Image (tube, rainbow, N blue to C red):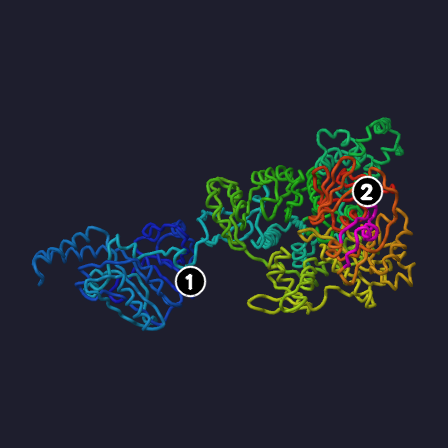
Amino acid sequence: MGLLNRDKTNYKLYELFPRVDQKVDVFNSLGHVFELIYYKDKDILHIFTRTAAQIEVLRQYFDVKEAQTIPSAKFVGKVLLKNEKDFYWGIEVNDFTNVLTKLQEKEQLRIWIVLEPRLNDILLKHADKLRRNQSLIGKRQREIIASRLENYAKDNLYYVQVYVLSNEKDRIKTLTDELKKYILTRSGKLRLEITKTSKWEDETPRVPRFWNLKYKRWVWVDEDKLNKIAIIPDPSILPTTVGRGAPLPTIVPERQGFRVGINPETGKEVRLELEDLQRHMYVIGGTGAGKTSFLGTLMTHFMKAYPESVTVLIDPNGDFAEQLASTMADYEKLIYVDPVQTTIAVNPLSIPDGIPKDQAELLAESNVKEIFEQLFALKAGAVYVEYVIINALKILYMKTRNPTFSDLYNIILKLRSGELDLPINDPLWEEKLQQFQELEETTYVSALSRLEEYATNPLLKRLFSSDSISDVLEPGNLIVINASNAYIGDKASFLMIAGWVYKLWYSALIRRALRKKLIPVLTIIDEFEVISDLSIIDTILSQARKFYMHLVLAHQHTGQLKPEMLKSIFSNTAVKVLMRTAGDDAEKLSKVDQDFASKIERVLPKLEPGEAVMTIMPRKQGDPATPFKVKFDYIELKFNQERLSDAIRRMKEKYMTEERKDDVLSLVNPLFKYIERPNVIEQQVLYHIYVGRTENGNHSIYLVDLLKKLGVDRDKVEDVINKLEASGYISVEKVKNKKLLMYGKGLFGDIKTIAPSDEGRKLAMKVMLRYMKNKYYVVTVKQTPDLAARPDLAAIPFDTNYTLRYDQAVAVEIESCNELSVHPEQVMHNFRKESIKDFAEIHSWTYAECFNKLQELYNQLSDEEKKKVKIFSVKLKQKVEQKPKEIMNKAEETGEFAKAKAVQVTESNAMADTLNIDNNNGKAPEGPKPDSALTGELTSNGILELQIQGRTVRIYRAESTIEIDGRKYKIPPFELRALLNRKDSIIAIVAKEKKIIISYNDGSSSELTPLS
């Protein structure tokens, strides 16, 4: 810089991210000596500053991050005044925003703003010179200029050095010409000096002690004009990198423990210690916020810092558990719990070995009782129920240290019946046995109902049998519990999670009672809303510190929790990790710190994945109590099937006591004996493509139309489409900027195996399409040699969330006309085969032409068998000739029968055409119609009104709804058609205890279960 002073001030380079509608005080934020750098990167303007201001000050106005360098250009142009007259006359300026809009890609405008007191001296000296008549200009002009200079010298004056950088000299000249419109001089001109950036240094411009004429070409302004030059563009006007929210404090508590991340503003490490987790942690974050990644980082870093602790992950979804188990497959103390493949039994009722008998009984009196009060909701009013359960357990502890729920259930049954004969001579117990006989029946029913799930469910009996693990709290254990509801259903998943939580809690209580060394247990429960209603959670939150059991409760949004649970979490968790959320969630979560509520509410929706607002409860004097932002370290947890299989193999070798002869997955869900794991959305995608039609032909649909029909997240649907396209099941083309999906194969599976003939195959395909249309997942069953008894198809209804209702699964049999004629005995066998026990109903389908034969065979079934079997017919052609009404009343019967719900209905041909079910075949037995029988009329709008015993029952065909006494009940479409089939035979219909009970004039009755 030649004669310029070398400024030794420590200036730092920062990138600034202005906030929308944020007013910036340039002097208060950047100081009185700073450089603003505007760099155009494609369509975005980046703003940098070189300043001595502290980053904490900058954050009051901007989001900020430290920068190392800025991309340079080949040439730099230095903008100066044309001559000395311009210098002394001063300049006028207009807002530089318009200049910034002219920058092209990789071009820069740099502006140094320097408070320079010597400027005041220079101006005053020149004013004195003018007044002493030492100038060639006239007297009047000398007085005007002198007065102007003296006025300027009263205020702070700033040097303004402007640089224009570009890879082309012509662009520098063009931009300088543009600057002339906003830097207005007396001469109307500016001086431009262009040089290569390789010979240029961007240093602070200062007037040296001995200045000369050269410096009278520098641009200078007073403070009033500075705000038009040193501008921070509004992001809503000029595309710039935008700040993401109000600033939070950057003070991070000092900790020595293990690192979880950094404060993104200061780069300071964020660490946690065991003591921080003793009062538990709360983690919330929506989809894509990085919650799972953070939990993985937390677990792995905690284990390294505290290797003698026990770390537990409970995952209701299963993906996180599989990823962690894959990553930690080589860890010696890994315990991977999967109810399907590596069932590890843990008995919450067992007492560890080595405890004297008397002490074991005391534990049963205290700890076990405390657990049962939570597990079985034994409130103060359930004194006798508690009495029965606790004393029954005492009896068991006399005989074994490892009683199971099944043992407890059975012994209460014995106590109830009086069959129990204790092998002891104890008057006290004899008196208790007598007291058991005098208890009311409701006491036993209440006790047994609490235990029934644990004692009778085959899976739970297996999961909670004798302990596979001698000590779950052995130092260093990593327990990964995969409680995937996709494999075992929501209820079993809930019971599995609850059982493990109680087991861990019970083990912690036992260790303290036995005065053993307490082992810190970090228990992470992902998607914990599954068990948030368990009062034990609140108990652990408030009491677990003294037992060294520390919870990390994670979920996605506040709507999953009851307000009182959320309040308890806010009160009883020392560490809160608030990841990206929006709307009501952000507003509710901001209340974790009332002093910073508005700032937290603004920041939460704008967090990047892996970022969070964190609060840590102060533990000692001087600890900050303010929220701060954190960017978590990322540790990749990657699913690896080979490594997971190795871990599963180890678990089987180490913990499973005997080989299982049955397929475990089928034991959990019998339907998996017949089908592979369903993918409902994938089948629905194929179905809608298959039945769709566009101007491009049949079996095609546009993606936009498919999304409307499915009502599923676009990303999820496109993942399915990509998979189907890669497998050759569909093809995808772009037509008029829209994705066109065309069917190839795969919808009907291996249909030839169940229907080898053309006749049977057409029938099976038609039937499958009917089920898919009516929101069923339908698939051909496995053709494995060990599965002798199996239906042709399995159909499972699903709800609006695409959740399968396995309890309503249907076994489907396809009977061709040839099969009915040649092998009627096989058709009868299909009604009765062993596999029917695994399904709610059996549906048998044939063509309308041979439906009479199918009905004849159906009529051979017993009344009990008919409760589970329904028969149907379909026509190859949908068009049905309209028959006279008197003939229809006699012949229009659909041949649709249900398990005790099988009813007959008279429908119009229009309805039959819609359902594609033949209703001109088959005739069910008729009986005399009593006076009280229903009479009804199907109206043109599809509403059937039935009058019976002075009451009106309405059936809404389009809605598949029954209205009884003003209340509507949603029922499956098949059930509705079955009901309509026998409308003339109904003599009574009532809603009772979540069932709809129907009585017929032939003495039979049926029950319908409304959809929830």
Q: Which residue is mark 1?
A: 44
Residue 874 seen: yes
Viewer-side residue, 293 vs 244: 244
State the predominant SS element of the stretch in magenta: loop
- Residue 214 image point, x, y percent: 20, 66
Depth order, front residue of 601/37:
601
Looking at the rendered image, the quarter that the N terminus falls into is bottom left
* Residue matched to label 2: 986
Can residue 476 be seen at all in this image of the molecule? no
x, y percent for residue 819: 88, 63
Please state the horizontal and vertical placement of residue 635, each as a whole percent of the image: 58, 58
Q: Is residue 95 left or right of residue 469?
A: left
Q: Secondary structure at mark 1?
A: strand
Q: Nearer the viewer, residue 915 or 228?
A: 915
The span picked out in magenta is 880-908
Disc on the earlier residue, 2 or 1 = 1
Q: Could you say which is closer to the camera, residue 606 or residue 131?
A: 606
Which amino acid type is shown beneath numbered disc 1?
Answer: Ile
The image quarter containing residue 511 is: top right
Report if the CB atoms under discs 2 and 1 are less than 8 Å apart.
no
Q: Quadrant of residue 542?
A: top right
Which residue: 72% across, 58% down?
Answer: 772
Query: What residue is drawn where x is 50% and y is 41%?
Result: 593
The amino acid marked with disc number 2 is Ile
Relative to 472, residue 763 above or below: below
**Residue 882 drawn in magenta:** yes
201 horizontally vs 437: left or right:
left
What percent of the width, then of the height, locates residue 328?
66, 57
